[in-house]
Image (spheres, rainbow, N blue to C red):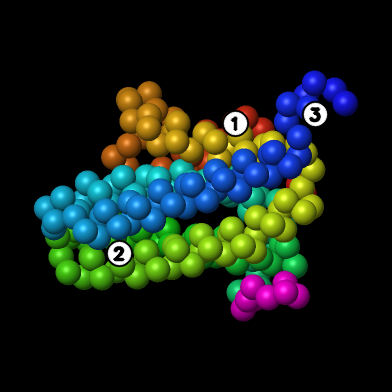
Amino acid sequence: MDEQSTANPTGEVELDLTTVLAGQHARIRELFATALAAPPEGRAQQFGRLSRLLAIHEAAEQESLHGAADPAADSDLGIAATDKATDEEVSAQRRREEQAAGDTIENLQGMDPTSLSFRMQLAQLQEAVSRHADAEETEELPRFLARASAQQRDHALMTLGRVDELVADTSEQAAVPAGVGFAEQLAAARLALGSAGRAPRA
């Protein structure tokens, strides 16, 4: 067994990938709770932190986990996650959920964050994102790990591992600019994460 295989066995990568994904989902849940508990005058700042993490986290998933699926599966808008669903259909459903969440976030960015309607929509988004995260951990990730090569697992771990770095950098030279809308941050994050090159499809 060579040095690289000993230092980075497949089981360790799978465990790390599961841990990283679950940890980021836990952080997202924490930021939702913080934003919802914030006083009206502090809600905008907390929502900004949340939406930035969501944009970069979503970009990382699209570049690693969801990106392995066939985009043509998105044409079946009625597919539900079942035992008979294909890997592509499961990933396509996750992408549709993320698109819906992104639309809601952009709508919230145009609302008064001190209003009751803003908080109500934010609470609805919290529930949707929580269900989405659970489905990724219990449905999509196990399928990905079962079919992915070692290179694809390493790529996914590296990509998700860059999320905190990109979120934290709010300088003028940041790869993902702060203070812009969700769609702009998502696009910038995908560009930054994709610049390292994509692993072959699983």
The circle on residue 5 is 3
For label 1, the residue is 195
Split into 4 quadrants, where in the image is the N terminus?
top right
Chain-order first, disc 1 or disc 3: 3
Q: Is residue 128 visible?
A: yes
Amino acid at the residue labelled 2:
Leu
- Left or right, 110 with respect to 30, comes to left
For label 2, the residue is 122
Cα gap from disc 3 to disc 2, whole angstroms: 45 Å
Cα gap from disc 1 to disc 2, whole angstroms: 32 Å
Assess whether residue 84 is covered by the magenta stretch: yes
Q: Are marks 1 and 3 in contact (CB under 8 Å)?
A: no
- Left or right, 64 with respect to 118, comes to right
Is 27 situated above or below 88? above
Chain-order first, disc 3 or disc 2: 3
- Dominant secondary structure (helix, strand or loop) of the stretch shown in magenta: loop
